[in-house]
Every structure is written in structure tokens, then in C-alpha cells.
Image (cartoon, grey):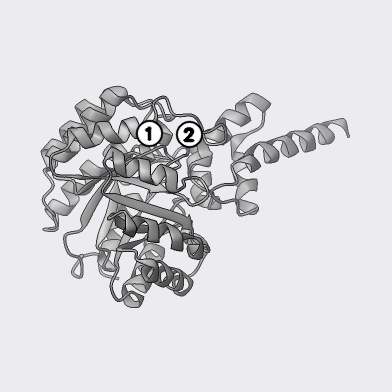
């Protein structure tokens, strides 16, 4: 694989600060914050801005965490703040329904990103149908894509393409991939799909979000995701302002204003960040064990409440191959580990 990016072309760049970043922000975005971030991203030339609860439409709940502000109000605030960029939302079948999708369209989205576990593309058929009925640009997400080989993922992507997906993403939800893993998976989709474009969504749990994104571009990725300052679940995502600078230096800038993005990261997002995601001890454990990135803050919170090491919780979740939608396992595993520890002390 060449690192000269000889095969790459300027990608479509989607920002997910207002969706994936919602995890790091503990789902506490206000309308004013959304307006400011969306306006800055739009002025910097981003193609689309994803806005939703971190777990997608309908995600505000006791299981995933409650939003401070109803996501339809946030979508509407973003739509009113942009002049060029599309507003997008994420939908996980089983969490979001036709009701939330219809409300999101009325609030102003022009794109929906339909996310399934990488083994379950077949559950998305009706959702792509709904998206097309509603006139939306439809994007498919194959989450936790490190868990299956490239040829398997290509078959799943073909299903999404047959349902009407305009783009299908390889999603490194656990931040567990190495550059060669990202390259092979994106390449497999590029060779298999006849109509749909191919995207890549990185997480930084092993410190490889940027490297994996570049590997995906070399493999032919048409779309890539990023967030301001890498604000997102786990150790975060590929940082948008850094990606823009790298693309510009590589002659692959799709029209992003590097310095406006640097200012947006520093002066718009920076002052309101709850913390700066980075590959700390527990985040690296997520990437190492292949655990869904959104589990990180839940594991830290529950571990603190029960006096159980979050690292032990995350490693056990990785051993059990926990995936999105199994957040209840975090508490169960923590209780089991606490009981085991108590038993060992009693002996």
C-alpha cells in the first residue's frame, strides 16, 4: 500500500461533531451551541453536518442517556444556521422509527445515515425505502466493521446498495482497526459496489483515526467523516481541522477552508467542550479489545459507582463481543466482576 495517496481523490467530508460529539458532550448540546457550530462548519465548506443524539434519532432514553434539548429542535437550529451544507441525522433501526425520521425531515434534514451492526444489513431495507420515499440522500453505516473480514462486509454493503443506499460506510466503531484493515475493507467495497459510493468513519482509540482515514482514501474512499477536535465517543474521531490541513497539503482539499476550521475548533467548540477525548488507558482498552466506543463513559461511570476497574469491564465486554444496543451488559458485567472480586476476598 502506497502512502503517497496516489489513488486518492478529494473526498466528500461530513462533520459529525453535533452527533458523535454528543457522546463526549453527554448529550447536553444547547440550541445556541448547535447554531454556532453549524454556522462555522457551513462557512468552512463542509458538505454535510450530522445532528442527532449520539445514538441517533430517538436515542434520548434512560439506556443511552437523555438529551438536554429535544433533537428536533437541534436539527431545526442547525438547518436555520446553514446556507450551503446539508443537515443529516443518524438512524439506528430499532432505536429510531419512521415517526422520528418523518419529524427530522420536517425539521430540515436532507440526508439520513442508517446504521446497522455489520452483520445485520438486512434489517435496513424498509428504512432505506422510507428514506427514498422522503427524498433523502441515504447513507448506510456498517458498524463494528473490524469484526468481520472484507469479503463479508462487501456482501452486506451490496444489500444496502440494493435497498437504495447512495453511500455505504465502513465504520470503525471500536477504533480497533490498523491502517491495513481500513484499506482492505474499503477496497473490498469499492470493488463490489456498482453504484453506491464508499465512506469511512474512524475512531481514535488506538491513535489511528487519521492514519486509518488516509488508508481509506488510498483504497478509494469517496466520503470520510471527522469532527472538530476529534470530539466524539471513546478517544474521539478524526479531527476535522487536522484532516482539512492534511488534505490541503496532499492536494486533495475538496473545498474546505483550513483556517476557518482551525478557528472553529479553537474558538467555537473549544470553550464549550466537556473534555478533550484522547487515547487514555480505558480508551486504548476499547480499541485493543474491540469494544463499541460509546461504552467508554458508561463503563467509567458504572465502574466508579461500583468500585470496579473500568479497564476490567471493557476487556470483559470485548471478550463477550458486545455491540451497539447491548449497553445493559455494562452494568451486568460490572456486577459480576464485583461479585467475583468479593468471592475471591472471602476465600
Would you call the spot at circle 2 few (<14 residues within 10 Å), some (14-19), or many (20 or more)? many
Q: Helix, strand or loop at disc 1?
A: helix
Residue sitting nearer the eye, 190 or 213: 190
Give coordinates of residue 102: x percent, y percent: 37, 45
Residue sitting nearer the eye, 121 or 10: 121
- Relative to 186, does residue 99 appear above or below in the rendering? above
For the N terminus, which image quadrant? bottom left
Is residue 142 shown left or right of residue 330? left
Q: Helix, strand or loop at disc 2?
A: loop
Residue visible at 46% across and 39% down?
Answer: 58
Give coordinates of residue 161: x percent, y percent: 36, 69
Q: Residue furthest right?
A: 347
Query: Does residue 141 appear in this view?
Result: no
Residue sitting nearer the eye, 273 or 2: 273
For the C terminus, which image quadrant? top right
Please give the label number shown on residue 139.
none
Residue ID for mark 2: 60
User: Does the CB distance between marks 2 and 1 fall below 8 Å?
Assistant: yes
Give coordinates of residue 181: x percent, y percent: 41, 64
The mark total stands at 2
Mark found first going from the N terminus, 2 or 1 = 2
Is residue 269 shown left or right of residue 99? left
Please give the label number shown on residue 71.
1
- Relative to 305, does residue 214 appear above or below in the rendering? below
Residue visible at 70% across and 39% down?
Answer: 332
Amino acid at each position: 500500500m502506497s502512502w503517497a495517496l496516489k489513488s486518492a481523490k478529494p473526498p466528500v467530508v461530513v462533520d459529525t461533531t453535533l452527533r458523535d460529539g454528543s457522546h463526549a458532550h453527554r448529550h447536553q448540546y444547547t440550541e445556541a451551541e448547535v447554531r454556532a457550530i453549524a454556522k462555522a462548519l457551513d462557512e468552512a465548506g463542509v458538505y454535510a453536518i450530522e445532528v442527532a443524539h449520539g445514538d441517533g434519532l430517538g436515542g434520548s432514553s434512560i439506556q443511552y442517556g437523555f438529551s438536554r434539548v429535544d433533537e428536533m429542535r437541534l436539527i431545526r437550529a442547525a438547518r436555520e444556521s446553514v446556507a450551503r451544507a446539508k443537515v443529516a441525522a443518524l438512524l439506528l433501526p430499532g432505536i429510531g422509527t419512521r415517526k422520528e425520521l418523518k419529524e427530522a425531515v420536517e425539521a430540515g434534514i436532507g440526508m439520513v445515515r442508517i446504521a446497522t451492526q455489520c452483520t445485520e444489513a438486512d434489517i435496513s431495507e424498509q428504512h432505506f425505502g422510507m428514506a427514498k420515499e422522503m427524498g433523502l440522500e441515504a447513507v448506510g453505516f456498517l458498524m463494528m466493521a473490524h469484526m468481520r473480514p472484507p469479503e463479508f462486509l462487501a456482501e452486506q454493503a451490496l444489500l444496502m446498495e440494493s435497498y437504495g443506499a447512495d453511500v455505504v460506510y465502513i465504520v470503525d466503531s471500536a477504533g480497533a482497526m490498523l491502517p491495513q484493515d481500513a484499506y482492505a475493507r474499503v477496497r473490498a467495497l469499492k470493488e463490489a459496489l456498482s453504484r453506491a459510493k464508499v465512506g469511512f468513519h474512524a475512531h481514535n482509540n488506538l491513535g489511528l483515526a487519521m492514519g486509518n482515514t488516509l488508508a481509506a482514501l488510498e483504497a478509494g474512499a469517496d466520503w470520510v467523516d471527522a469532527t472538530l477536535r476529534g470530539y466524539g465517543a471513546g478517544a474521539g474521531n478524526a479531527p476535522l481541522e487536522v484532516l482539512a490541513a492534511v488534505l490541503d497539503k496532499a492536494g486533495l482539499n475538496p473545498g474546505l477552508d483550513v483556517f476557518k476550521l482551525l478557528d472553529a475548533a479553537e474558538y467555537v467548540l473549544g470553550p464549550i467542550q466537556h473534555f478533550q477525548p484522547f487515547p487514555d488507558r480505558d480508551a486504548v482498552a476499547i480499541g485493543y479489545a474491540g469494544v463499541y466506543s460509546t461504552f467508554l463513559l458508561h463503563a467509567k461511570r458504572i465502574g466508579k459507582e461500583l468500585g470496579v476497574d473500568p479497564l476490567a469491564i471493557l476487556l470483559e465486554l470485548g471478550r463477550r463481543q458486545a455491540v451497539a444496543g447491548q449497553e445493559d451488559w455494562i452494568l451486568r458485567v460490572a456486577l459480576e466482576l464485583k461479585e467475583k472480586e468479593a468471592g475471591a476476598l472471602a476465600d
